[in-house]
Image (cartoon, helix red, strand yellow):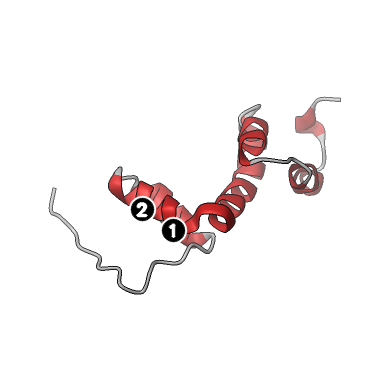
Amino acid sequence: MPLVYLPPELVPIIAGHLKSETDLNCFAQTSQCLYRWVNPCLYRCAVQNMGEALLHWAASKGQLQTLLRLLAFGAKLPANTRITTTDS
C-alpha cells in the first residue's frame, strides 16, 4: 500500500518513530502529500532541538517564510532581539 493512501492521522505517528531530523526530512520529501503532513512535525522537532540557532540562520539568510514558520511552531526570540526592516 503506498504511503499516500494511509489515513492522515497515522502519518505523525509514523513520523514520531523516526530517529533523526534527517530521517524525518527524507520522509517528508517522498511525496507532496507527505510533505504537507510531515513538515509541521519537522518544524516542531527542529524548534525543540535548535530553535534559537535556526532563527539566527533564517534571519542571516533572509529566509522570512522559514523564520515565520519557526516562530509559528514555538521558536522564541532571545529577549535582547532587535527587529529592523529594510525597504526593498
Quadrant where the N terminus is found in the figure = top right
SS of the residue at dot 2? Answer: helix
Query: Percent x, y for residue 81?
Result: 30, 68
Q: Nearer the viewer, residue 82 or 86?
A: 82
Q: CA distance from mark 2 to mark 1?
A: 6 Å
Q: Which mark is residue 9?
A: none
Q: In the displayed structure, would residue 38 be above or below residue 76?
A: above
Query: Percent x, y for residue 17?
Result: 79, 44
Query: Percent x, y for residue 67?
Result: 40, 53
Left or right of 68 on screen, residue 18:
right
The residue carrying pointer 1 sits among few (fewer than 14), some (14 to 19) or many (20 or more) residues within 10 Å by Cα, namely some
Residue drawn at x 46%, y 61% is 71
Q: Which mark is residue 56?
A: 2
Q: Amino acid at mark 2?
A: His
Q: Are marks 2 and 1 in contact (CB under 8 Å)?
A: yes
Q: How many marks?
A: 2
Residue at numbered disc 1: 52
Q: In the displayed structure, would residue 6 be above or below residue 86?
A: above
Quarter of the rendering containing residue 55: bottom left
Residue farthest along the left direction in this orientation: 87
Residue drawn at x 78%, y 30% is 3
Q: Nearer the viewer, residue 17 or 12?
A: 17
Left or right of 28 on screen, residue 72:
left
SS of the residue at dot 1? Answer: helix
Left or right of 46 on screen, residue 84:
left
Query: Percent x, y for residue 20?
Result: 67, 40
Quarter of the rendering containing residue 49: bottom right
Residue drawn at x 64%, y 28% is 31
Q: Nearer the viewer, residue 22 or 71?
A: 22
Left or right of 74 on screen, residue 10:
right
Q: Amino acid at mark 1?
A: Glu
